[in-house]
Amino acid sequence: MKIMAVDYGDARTGLAVCDRTEFLASPIGTVQERNAQILAMKVAHMAEQYEVGEIVIGLPLNMNGSEGPRAQKCRLFAETVECVTELPVKLWDERSTTVSAHRILNETNVRGKDRKNVVDTVSAVLILESYLEYRRKNKDKL
């Protein structure tokens, strides 16, 4: 099944999708949209275009595991996406993905405007890779 990951942001939202074998996570771009309802419609369009069967949205938990205002915003967005797409939507712990994305971009020497344009997409790929790894290790629990 194809799965799409979403790294939800106030201004930019990164998207990634995996292949049907759930092995390879690939970036599919960044959507620039501030209105959550319009963004949910754009995510729904991308989900339809890529023929995904499930959507995973990063949940930015605090380092101690608690939820702050940003996590609540992501929960509300996930509910909106689920209503618009009628696909199952899962929330996935995304702690440190943005930090990891910046580290990857440092290692590949991506700077300035290029970095700003891809960091959310790289984060979405990292969220999806983590989720796919969990699915591979826990097939019996799914």
Image: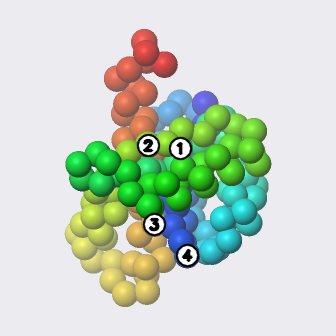
Contact between labelled residues 3 and 1, with CB atoms less than 8 Å apart: no
Q: Is residue 141 above or below residue 75?
A: above
Q: Earlier in the sequence, mark 3 or mark 2?
A: 2
- Please give left or right for residue 125 compared with residue 110 in the image: right
Q: In this view, does 21 lie above or below 128?
A: above
Res 92 label: 2
Residue that label 1 marks? 56
Q: Where is residue 99 in the image (x, y as percent from the top left)?
A: 27, 64
Q: How far apart are marks 2 and 1 (CA)?
A: 6 Å
Residue that label 3 marks? 120
- Please give left or right for residue 98 compared with residue 118 in the image: left
Q: Distance between the residues labelled 1 and 4?
A: 19 Å
Task: Look at label 1 and name its amino acid.
Answer: Val
Residue depicted at x 43% and y 79%: 116
Residue that label 4 marks? 11
| SS state under label 2 | strand
| SS state under label 4 | loop
Q: Which of 55 and 84 is in front in this view?
A: 84
